[in-house]
Amino acid sequence: MKEARMKRCLVLLACLTAGIAVAEPLPEIEAAGVISAPEQGWPYFFGSCSWYCGAPAIEVAASSFLTEKSGLRHPPLQAHDQSMDQVWSEGADGNGIGESLTFTFTTTEKDTTGLGVTSCAIASGHQGSEKLFRQNARPRVIELSYDGEPVARLRLGDAMGLQRFEIPKLVLERPSRHRIRLKIIEVYPGTHFEDTCIAEVRFQGTGKMH
């Protein structure tokens, strides 16, 4: 670790000496907390009033998704379906480094005023059971981008439940179209499968909810 830091410092020094511009490293954001399964169950939790009561239309896409040999599919919408039992699983070779989920927020003049995204919660891996959680790969570091521009890296713990992050505010003007991308940078390897899963992503923010 110390050698890697030393090499990085030497590279930065060489770039500065040569007059080469060096990009600032992205800020890293640790989870502000973990929301465990409520006693009433996740359907009760997701059914309660939240930012989604006044949220704009949200489309979900992914760079890839897995279709198993049995025909069972794990498309991106399953990471935003108010269920912890279904997952988005990337479908690329290897453990999914570089694969991503993209959420597109489309507002109209009829949407509520003052809308913005200020936090997100991510259920990393397969949340169906402890066994499935360990068998499948889980994101360790996710790059957060707004409209194609990286703004931060989210560092996830290796834990079940929704991990909440306070993120830079994304203002959703009326009308507008903005994209949030979550790109897998590092993973916790699974014990049985290479596929990296995300069970759920939820957003919170500002705006009149009723």
Image (tube, grey):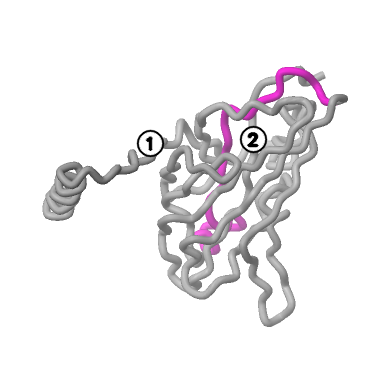
Q: Residue at x 64, y 70 (%)?
A: 66
Find disc 2 in the rendering and name its residue: 203
Tell me where the magenta segment starts and ends, as one range: 111-133
Indicate yes or no whether the magenta region holds residue 128: yes
Give me the disc on residue 27. Answer: 1
Q: Count every numbered label the image shows and give the total.
A: 2
Say if 103 sits above or below 132 in the image. Answer: above
Q: Is residue 69 left or right of residue 210?
A: left
Residue found at the very far right of the displayed protein: 110
Q: Mark 2 against mark 1, which lies toward the viewer?
A: 1
Nearer-the-camera pick, 156 or 179: 179
Q: Amino acid at mark 2?
A: Phe
In the image, residue 122 lies at what x, y percent? 56, 44
Nearer-the-camera pick, 193 or 205: 205
In the image, residue 148 lies at what x, y percent? 56, 46
Residue found at the very far front of the displayed protein: 19
Secondary structure category for the residue under label 2: strand
Q: Residue at x 57, y 38 (%)?
A: 121
Mark 1 crowdedness (10 Å alpha carbons): few <14, some 14-19, many ≥20: few
Q: Amino acid at mark 1?
A: Pro
Q: Residue at x 65, y 58 (%)?
A: 62
Nearer-the-camera pick, 16 or 179: 16
Nearer-the-camera pick, 23 or 65: 23
